[in-house]
């Protein structure tokens, strides 16, 4: 029997703990992915597909050595409020800085930018490149504002290529905008 060891660090901010996904986090994630809230993250899904998607988040750490952290408030460390980190499935050429809040009651409090300001500096050391993308669906103004607040800018050329015939997002609806993060540009 082979033994597999994966080290997933814990990052902390003033209000958040960013940690490894656990089975306890699955229900928060599944509730999100089966709801209309997930429309900008390829949802909503049925429960079975959401369960598979949650497993893929944990598996990314094994295959890539990085992935999405589950974030919890320091005042409620057992409840995952969202996923924040690096999303890089096999079908994507470049790593993506991604984020999702699982419940509307956590919106408008600055948790996403707070989490990503901790994740991004850590990420540059582990992904081995100097740029990353954020894929933001047309109409998702809140995520576009977060990307800009973090120092990213719209990459018009990459957006056009990715949405064109043969592109990574050709079959996606709505249109996917690509925001470019560059090492050293974090605000």
Image: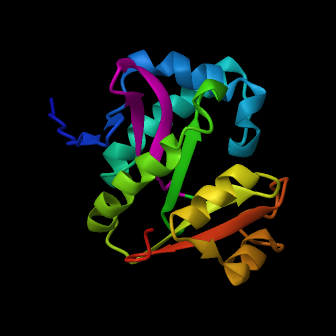
In the figure, is residue 104 to the left or right of 163? left
Q: Is residue 41 magenta?
A: no
Looking at the image, which residue is at 39% across and 76% down? 183
Looking at the image, which residue is at 44% across and 76% down? 185
In the figure, is residue 73 to the left or right of 125? right
Quadrant in the picture for residue 33: top right
Q: Quadrant of the N terminus?
A: top left
Q: Position of residue 70 (x, y in %)?
A: 41, 34
Q: Is residue 29 above or below residue 12?
A: above
Q: Is residue 81 magenta?
A: yes
Name the colour scheme: rainbow
Is residue 44 something one can see in this rendering?
Answer: no
Q: Position of residue 71 (x, y in %)?
A: 41, 34
Q: Quadrant of the C terminus?
A: bottom left
Q: Residue furthest bottom?
A: 157
Part of the protein shown in magenta: 68-90
Front residue of this view, candidates 121 and 172: 121
In the figure, is residue 134 to the left or right of 77? right
């Amino acid at each position: 029997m082979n033994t597999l060891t994966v080290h997933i660090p814990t990052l902390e901010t003033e209000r958040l703990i960013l940690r490894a996904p656990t089975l306890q986090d699955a229900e928060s994630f599944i509730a999100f992915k089966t709801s209309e809230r997930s429309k900008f993250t390829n949802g909503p899904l049925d429960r079975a597909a959401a369960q598979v998607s949650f497993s893929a988040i944990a598996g990314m750490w094994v295959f890539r050595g990085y992935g999405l952290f589950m974030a919890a408030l320091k005042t409620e460390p057992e409840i995952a409020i969202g996923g924040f980190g690096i999303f890089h499935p096999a079908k994507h050429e470049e790593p993506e800085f991604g984020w999702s809040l699982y419940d509307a009651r956590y919106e408008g409090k600055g948790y996403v930018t707070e989490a990503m300001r901790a994740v991004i500096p850590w990420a540059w050391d582990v992904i081995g490149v100097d740029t990353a993308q954020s894929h933001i669906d047309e109409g998702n103004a809140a995520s576009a504002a977060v990307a800009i607040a973090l120092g990213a800018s719209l990459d018009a050329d990459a957006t056009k290529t990715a949405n064109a015939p043969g592109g990574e997002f050709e079959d996606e609806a709505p249109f996917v905008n690509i925001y470019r993060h560059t090492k050293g540009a974090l605000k």
